[in-house]
Structure formats: structure tokens, C-alpha cells
């Protein structure tokens, strides 16, 4: 177990370094951030002076090595736009994104698992067909389109929920539903398909032949085995939810990490973008590790060597 955790920690470090390198290079390909901080009629000499003052006149590899040195100390540099440490800005916005992401994940899991189990146990029924269509529809709707439709229906027409901002639970419902719908549809379809496969296996027929009730067969014997691939996808869905939060937070003006990331891209604020992407990558790597460890709980045969 210890060796497995050490290997995963090493892999995580390599992944985070790769993410930081790709983010660093992409940000430099978006354009020169110095042009945003000088007047339109600035002379080339003034632009060069500003570039030197901001440290962008050095070779890219030197700038990246300096960034890695600061990363080891937890220093991502100062925001060019906000004039404060980039990591502080990310930490300030992180609770709003975590609140939104975990509520959306909770909605997706709590809706998908029971719907998938019931649909599989009633194979061929109208309810099973309905869940299949719900899964297709949920995975087909773009996040931004669904968010705008919810705003139009619940905020503009019915005036039941606020269209933007953060405050009460009412502000949270539509954004969480928006980014959680895709994950709910995917998990429900996976749970339905996996349960159908398991319910047709020999050990399920044996359990029924022993006289066990259908409830015990479905929920104790079949569902536990069906949860293993679902848990795998749940860990991967954290990245999907964080990616959806980038768009959703912009649509609903939610003051989270995703909206800060979009603002950082627009402002070419390299320190903010690098800090935000790094923190998101760290959360996704951590979620994948937790997912792997959960296998041992669901299936005692799993061993970490």
C-alpha cells in the first residue's frame, strides 16, 4: 500500500509539472500581456521598458524555471491585474467553486444511481425506456444552452430563482443543476447498463434460486458489483464538472474559480491562470487517487501492490 501511494505521488508530481508547462506555453501563445498595460500610442521604447520591468524580456525557459522555483514555495507570482498574490485570489474563489461542484456531483450521484438501478431491474418497461431517453437528452444539451434556458424559464418567466450572483441556496440551484445534468445522465446510463449485465449473470440466478427476495438480490448482490465502474467514472467526472463550472460560472456570474480563470485569460494574467489551472489539476489528481482507494472498499479482492 505504501509503495502504491508513493508511485501515485510521483505520477501526480509529473502530471502537475506537465500541466504547468502546457499552461505556461499556451499563455505565452495568446499574445503579449504588456500591450494591455501601456497606452495605444506608446512608443516601442516604452513597451520595451515595461516588458523589462514585468520580467517578460527574459528567455521562456528562464521564466519557466523561475516559475517552478516559486511553485515549490507556493508562490505563483502576483496578478498583473489585481496587484496581489495569484494564489490568494484562487484561494478566495475556491470555496464558491467547491460548493457548486460538490452539490452538482451530489445531485448527479443521488439521482443517477437509484434511477439506473430501477431502470435495470424493470428492463423492457416504459420507465426503463424513459431513463434511456433522459440519459441521451442529458448528454446532448450543451452546458451554456441549458443554463440560459433555466434562466429564461425560472428567472425571467416564473421569477422563482435569481438569475445570477451568490448568496442563498436559491442562487445555487440553477448553476448546480446546469453542470450536474450531464454527469447525472452519464452515470445513470452507465449504472443502467452495468446493472443489466450483472443481473443476467449466474451468481444472480443462484441467489434468486436460494429464495432471496428481489430487493436483496438487486441492492445487496448486484448493485455493489455495479458500483465499481460507476465509481471510476465519478472520479473522472470531477474534471468534467470543473470544466463545466468555467462556463457555468460565467453564465450565472458565479464568483468562483472558473470565472476567475476566464477573466485571467481575457486579461492575459499569467500568474492567475497558472495558479487556477494548477489548483484544478491538483483536485482532479486527488479525486482520482481517492477513487482508486475506494475500489478496495467496494471489492475486497482489489489489492494495491
Image (cartoon, rainbow, N blue to C red):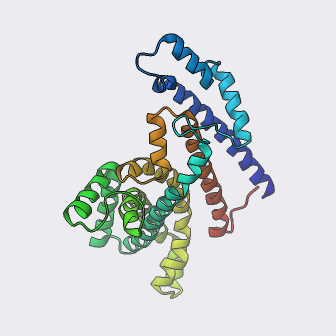
Percent x, y for residue 250? 39, 48
- Foreground residue among 278 and 32: 32
| Lateral position of residue 160 relative to residue 215, left or right | left
Residue 170 locus on image (x, y percent): 37, 68
Quarter holding residue 126? bottom left
Does residue 175 appear anywhere in the picture? yes
Task: Examine the rendered structure and indicate whether residue 289 appears above or below residue 37.
Answer: below
Q: Is residue 125 visible?
A: no
Please indicate whether residue 41 sits to the left or right of residue 75 in the image: left
Question: Percent position (x, y) of residue 62?
Answer: 69, 23
* Residue at 61% across, 54% down: 288
Q: Is residue 98 left or right of residue 151?
A: right
Left or right: 296 in relation to 174? right
Dividing the image into 4 quarters, which one contains the N terminus? Answer: bottom right
Q: Is residue 123 above or below residue 303?
A: below
Q: Quadrant of the C terminus?
A: bottom right
Residue lying furthest left: 157
Residue 299 location in percent, x, y?
64, 67
- The residue most toward the right is 2
The one nearer the camera, 283 or 229, is 283
- Residue at image position (45%, 53%) is 255
Question: Which residue sits at x=54%, y=25%?
Answer: 28
Q: Is residue 186 above or below residue 56?
A: below
* 42 is higher (above) or lower (below) than 302: above
Q: Quadrant of residue 133?
A: bottom left
Q: Residue at 50%, 78% (x, y): give it.
A: 219
Q: Along the line of sight, which residue is nearer the eye, 304 or 103?
A: 103
Q: Nearer the viewer, residue 207 or 116?
A: 116
Amino acid at each position: 500500500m505504501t509503495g502504491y501511494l508513493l508511485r501515485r505521488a510521483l505520477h501526480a508530481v509529473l502530471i502537475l509539472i506537465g500541466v504547468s508547462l502546457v499552461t505556461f506555453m499556451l499563455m505565452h501563445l495568446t499574445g503579449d500581456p504588456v500591450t494591455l498595460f501601456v497606452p495605444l500610442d506608446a512608443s516601442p521604447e516604452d513597451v520595451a521598458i515595461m516588458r523589462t520591468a514585468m520580467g517578460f524580456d527574459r528567455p521562456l525557459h528562464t521564466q519557466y524555471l523561475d516559475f517552478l522555483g516559486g511553485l515549490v514555495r507556493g508562490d505563483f507570482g502576483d496578478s498583473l491585474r489585481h496587484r496581489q498574490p495569484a494564489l490568494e485570489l484562487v484561494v478566495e474563489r475556491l470555496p464558491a467553486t467547491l460548493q457548486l461542484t460538490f452539490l452538482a456531483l451530489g445531485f448527479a450521484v443521488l439521482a443517477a444511481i437509484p434511477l439506473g438501478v430501477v431502470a435495470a431491474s424493470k428492463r423492457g418497461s416504459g420507465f426503463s425506456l424513459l431513463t434511456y431517453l433522459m440519459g441521451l437528452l442529458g448528454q446532448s444539451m450543451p452546458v451554456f444552452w441549458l443554463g440560459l434556458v433555466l434562466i429564461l424559464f425560472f428567472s425571467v418567466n416564473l421569477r422563482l430563482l435569481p438569475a445570477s450572483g451568490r448568496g442563498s441556496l436559491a442562487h445555487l440551484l440553477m448553476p448546480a443543476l446546469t453542470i450536474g445534468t450531464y454527469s447525472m445522465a452519464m452515470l445513470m446510463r452507465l449504472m443502467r447498463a452495468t446493472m443489466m449485465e450483472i443481473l443476467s449473470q449466474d451468481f444472480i440466478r443462484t441467489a434468486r434460486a436460494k429464495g432471496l427476495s428481489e430487493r436483496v438480490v438487486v441492492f445487496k448482490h448486484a448493485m455493489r458489483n455495479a458500483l465499481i465502474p460507476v465509481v471510476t467514472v465519478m472520479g473522472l467526472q470531477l474534471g468534467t464538472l470543473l470544466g463545466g463550472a468555467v462556463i457555468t460560472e460565467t453564465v450565472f456570474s458565479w464568483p468562483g474559480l472558473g470565472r476567475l480563470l476566464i477573466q485571467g485569460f481575457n486579461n492575459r494574467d499569467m500568474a492567475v491562470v497558472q495558479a487556477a489551472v494548477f489548483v484544478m489539476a491538483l483536485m482532479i489528481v486527488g479525486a482520482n487517487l481517492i477513487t482508486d482507494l475506494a475500489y478496495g472498499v467496494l471489492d475486497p479482492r482489489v489489492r494495491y501492490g
